[in-house]
Amino acid sequence: MAVTPYRVTPARLGNSSGLRLPAAFYRDHPQFAGVAGQMEVLDDTTLLLRLEPEEPQQGEAEEDSLLLGLFLDFLSRQALTSDPGPVLYTEAMAAGDEELLDGVTVEAADEPLGV
């Protein structure tokens, strides 16, 4: 993961002071929009900010799977009703995909990074 520095600026929030993050931060990391967290002072010029995104609620996960199912149904109908019909996946296509994926490593979701 490439490190992108984000410039923070001071901001006045009611009777409190705060640090403002640029919109680019939230575009690059939408999981942190609107979340709370903790900050720790490491030394005179370094802070450690730990944001704690909320886990998706059960209802949200069900809604996402419903929407995904509807979208996949739509794609299936489009593929089956198109003029040329479905395109068969050939050995040549598979070889091209293997060539594109050569050297790419995939990490399992349950494995920590860097293991």
Image (cartoon, rainbow, N blue to C red):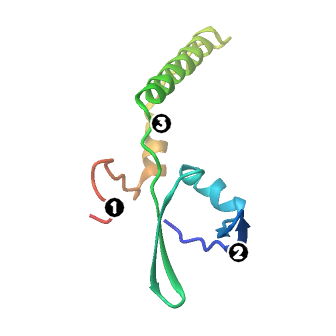
| First in residue order: circle 2 vs circle 1 | 2
> Could you tell me the amino acid type at mark 2?
Pro
Q: Which mark is residue 113?
A: 1
- Tell me which numbered mark, 3 or 1, is placed earlier along the sequence: 3
In which quarter of the view is residue 28 placed? bottom right
Give the CA distance from mark 2 to mark 1.
33 Å
User: Dot 3 corresponds to which residue?
Assistant: 92
Task: Please report whichever mark, 2 or 3, sits nearer to the chain's N-terminal start.
Answer: 2
Instruction: Single out the residue that lies furthest toward the front.
Output: 15
Q: CA distance from mark 2 to mark 3?
A: 57 Å
Decide: is 84 above or below 57. above
Is residue 76 toward the left or the right of residue 38 in the image? Answer: right
Q: Nearer the viewer, mark 2 or mark 3?
A: 2
Q: Which residue was labeled with disc 2?
A: 10
Q: Label 2's element?
A: strand
Which of the two discs, 3 and 1, sits closer to the camera? Answer: 1
Is 97 left or right of 83, judged from the image as shown?
Answer: left
Q: Secondary structure at mark 3?
A: helix
Q: CA distance from mark 3 to mark 1?
A: 33 Å
Which residue is at the front of the view, 36 or 29?
36
> What x and y, as percent, mark residue 66?
49, 19
Q: Which mark is residue 5?
A: none
Element type where label 1 sits in the image? loop
Instruction: Rate crowding at label 1 as few (under 14), some (14 to 19) or many (20 or more) other CA atoms within 10 Å.
Output: few
Q: Position of residue 44 (x, y in %)?
A: 51, 91
Residue depth check, mark 2 versus mark 1: number of the one nearer the observer: 2
Q: Residues within 10 Å of mark 3 (few under 14, many from 20)?
A: few
Q: Please tell me which residue lies in front, 87 or 73.
A: 73
Percent position of residue 11, x then y: 72, 70
Residue at point 49%, 36% (across, down): 93
Above/below status of 81 relative to 13: above
Q: Give amino acid for label 1.
A: Leu
